Image: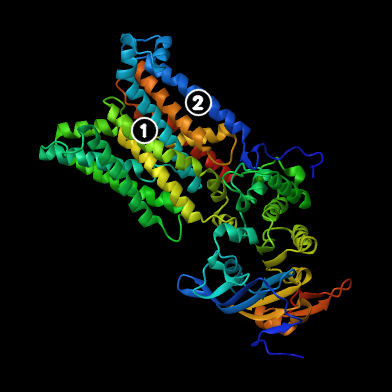
Amino acid sequence: MTQTTAEARTVGPSAAGRLRAEHVTVGYGDQPVVHDVSLQIPDGRVTTIIGPNGCGKSTLLRTLSRLLTPSSGTVVLDGAAIGSQSARQLARTLALLPQSPVAPEGLLVRDLVGRGRHPHQRWFQQWSHGDEDLVTDAMRWTGILDLADRPVDALSGGQRQRVWIAMTLAQHTDLVLLDEPTTYLDLAHQVDVLDLVCRLNRERGATIAMVLHDLNLAVRFSDHLVVMQHGCVVAQGDPTQILTAELLLEVFGLDADLVADPRTGIPMVVPRGQKGSH
Amino acid sequence: MSIPTTERLRPALRIGPTSWRLHPRAVVCSASATVLVAVLLVVDLAYGDLRIPFADVVRALLGDSSGVNAFIVRDVRLPEASVALLAGLALGLSGALIQTIARNPLASPDVIGVNAGAAAGAVGYIVLFAAAGSTAPSGVSADLAIPLAAFAGALIATVLLYAAGWRRGLDGRRLVLVGIGIAAALTAVTSWLLVAARLQTAASAQVWLSGSLTGVTSSNELWLLAVIVLVAPVALWQGSSLNIIELGDDTAHALGVRPSRAQAKALLCAVLLAAVAVSAVGPIGFVAFVCPQIARRLAGTSRPPLLTSALTGAGLVLVADVITRLWLTGLAVGVVTSLVGAPYFIYLLIRTQKDHLS
């Protein structure tokens, strides 16, 4: 059963969600980047937003995490407008790992991860036993406990990204948003990070929403896929069903085939161009 | 549930439900710096035209006011020494705050126009009132008129900085660039005032401009103390939100801190502290720039530790004061601090270049 890409294609049951965008239009300055987008982030699932460069996926994620304020429409969290909560309150429910975060020079791993506890701390409760336990647990879970005393800027890209994820984990929230968590990492580390993110969802029940630019990894690691183009959602649903060769051509301008992975059956995007072809 | 094998991640002082973070190395640094500043204060009070034994100085400080030495220490030298100490504290703290919010070790209140604003205010006042032939406006003691004018000038410079530099938040780089521009403009105004004034007026303005501790009175001391007592606790309180700001605007937002609000608070404290210090002693260069970085390296932290930076600032100004008393009499304190600061600035620039090229 085919549908035109002009309609948003939703395949599969739509799950309930604490976080959603309602008719959100947002941009930088005068030009809106995201146009009238309504999107539900299903609870307990991994949602990935993909699209070509400039489609507004990062902008949408940043709006969902309240980094940006929409010029029209609202983002709703737990039934209330997201703007009605204090920054601290929000940080206890929703964590965001921004794109390419930079740690200040000389900061140690254990200090950076420890700062994830900030939304839960008070001036007279700066480092409780609970904080200590959660941070140690976060570091152990991400496999960086033996790096605790090293400066963050001395680590490799893959290790550094694990540290940032540990900090997000220490923040102990139900919702975790990640903006391109795999940028600048080699493939092994990209898979590593995404495995970690999935474990976060499976083992800890966290609701994940992330922006990825790699189509194959997005299909492989998501429960719910959202495809954007020119600031609008053009398709969303089960990744194995909504990706078609037509969609790839129309949205990404990519001439490709979709081939099932022999081991798992998950569709893989195989571009048609190659060395020596014409 | 106990944590097997690993040692505690971070020491903390826990009393009942409360808990307080400890950074052992920073605490040791603060304690040592306090002792050092106390020693330097005693040294500063001991030397001068008359060499007073250290024991007498300590006795005089502790309240024993008998004898000529005690009189000299408490009534003649103490105002100047305590102004040096307080100004150093204020400048060190101010520099630490600005370098953290600008995320730039080359930033300091001198750079963002506080010194230039204070200079324009003070020189403007000296030239205008001297030109008109009138004394200070009634109701304001003559001692305080110039510091107040300098303070006002510094605050106006900051308002200009904020107005020109704020755009959806305070970006560190833009802060420094706009500050340099404002400082340049205000320096030009000050130079023009000096050129336009009569020779004697220009000469006395120039004395103020070089950052001198001579002629400091107890009203200066009280003014400085009052502002520091009000602002420093607020500034020191910013510590935990500075920890989050230094992680970047997006991460700060994600952790529940609004960067623009926290930066504005820290900037206000920093400017008030720098403005009051400069208004009391004239523009003393490099203290606010150098001391936070020294403190940072000593304490081994990722950002300049606030208390240690303040104490290092006090130490540097006292050292400069001792040097001018003992060996380079006639030179203003501001010159000596610049002699120390300029080579360090060059070293830091070269190191930053090397880090970028490597």
Q: Say which chain tag 1 marks.
A: B
Q: Is residue B257 left or right of residue B194?
A: right
Image x and y of residue B53, in percent: 40, 9
**Residue visible at 58% across and 41% down?**
B302
Depth check: A116 or B62 in front?
B62
Disc nearer the start of the sequence (1/2):
2
At label 2, counting other C-alpha atoms closer than 10 Å, the crowd grade (few under 14, some 14-19, many 20 or more) is: some
Q: Say which chain tag 2 marks.
A: B
Image x and y of residue B166, in percent: 41, 57
Image x and y of residue A106, in percent: 61, 41
Q: Is residue B158 left or right of residue B305?
A: left
Name, please, the residue furthest toward the front: B16
Residue A107 seen in this snapshot: yes
Query: What amino acid is found at the position of numbered circle 2 in the picture?
Result: Thr
Quarter of the figure that contains the N terminus of chain A: bottom right
Q: Is residue A56 left or right of residue A207?
A: left
**Residue visible at 16% across and 41% down?**
B128
Query: What amino acid is found at the position of numbered circle 1 in the picture?
Result: Leu
Residue B327 seen in this snapshot: no
The residue wearing badge 1 is B225
**Disc number for residue B34:** 2
In which quarter of the view is residue A270 placed?
bottom right
**Which type of secondary structure does the marked residue at label 2 adopt?**
helix
Depth check: B191 or A85 in front?
A85
Q: Is residue B307 left or right of residue A200?
A: left
Q: CA distance from mark 1 to mark 2?
A: 18 Å
In which quarter of the view is residue A269 placed?
bottom right
